[in-house]
Image (cartoon, grey):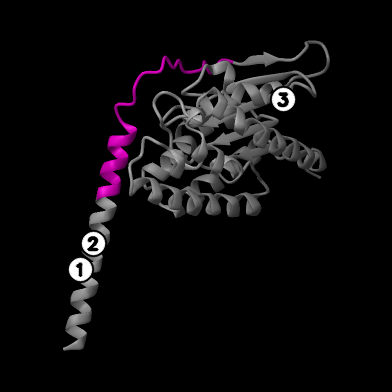
Amino acid sequence: MRIRVLRAVLGCLALAVAGLIGLLAIQALIATSDVPDVGYTPPSPAPRTFGAAGTGPALRYVVIGDSTATGEGAPYERSIAVASARHLAARRPVTLRNLAVSGARFGDVRRDQLPAAARAAPDVVLVAAGANDVTGLTGVGSVRADLREIADRLRAARCDVAIVVTGSPDIGAVPRLAQPLRAAAGSRTGRLNRAIANVARERGLVLAPIAERTGRLFRADRSLFAADEFHPSAAGYATWAPVIADALDDALRRAEMRSGCR
């Protein structure tokens, strides 16, 4: 009798969990679709140079990822791609090539953006992705496998490439998401970013922990979000810039120690 009751309880719990997952998926679809137009223009993938010419060979810098890498929600000149390129250009000229596509998951980055990134044999790569994997309920194992392949193929193209990965921003802070999705998204953000951090340690990447370092700021200040209440505003992207700059500096120091991959 007790076994039958236990089975019935477990069955009800399983149905409840399945129903909650379905509800979260529906809410995520509603929340991330039909986003109001905020005048966003995608960046051109054509190379762009920063810094003074004639002061040495330009640092080849490639950005891959999702809308956090394209700067959606703010003028492109205020994006993390441009801000980080200007930071790197304090050292030497930088040629930026931004291959990121709004809406991309890690799997899309691996399949659609990685081939061109690897062909460029860059000195530095910024991988800014994860938000769509959180809202799209991508399996953590898939993200781990995709990031490993991204790192391995970039290293195969240039063994001393400096690679920085941001992971997902704190999706639990996004005003556009209703509860209980917001709480669930915050939990998934943490789980996904822990997996990304583990791969970063394993593959010698540098993590720029934007969720950990700035999530509380986004939760406290809605002005850090754009009019769509989903993407960061220019002020929001500015909070990420120093986190990414620190990680790039660290990655370049590590790359210098691997110079020539001896």
Q: Kindly indicate whether the residue at mark 2 contacts the one at mark 1 (C-beta within 8 angstroms).
A: yes
What is the quadrant of residue 39 in the picture?
top left
Task: Check disc 3 and report the residue beneath it.
Answer: 87
Secondary structure of the residue carrying numbered label 2: helix
Q: Which residues are magenta?
A: 23-46
Of all residues shown, which one is farthest toward the bottom? Answer: 1
- Measure the alpha-carbon separation of dots 2 and 3: 49 Å
Task: Check disc 1 and report the residue beneath it.
Answer: 12
Percent from the top left, x then y, of residue 259?
80, 38
Q: Which mark is residue 152?
A: none
Type of residue at label 2? Ala
What is the quadrant of residue 210 in the picture?
top right
Front position in the image: 177 or 160: 177
Secondary structure of the residue carrying numbered label 3: helix
Q: How many marks?
A: 3
Type of residue at label 3? His
Q: Looking at the image, is 123 positioned above or below residue 220?
A: above
Q: Is residue 142 left or right of residue 262?
A: left
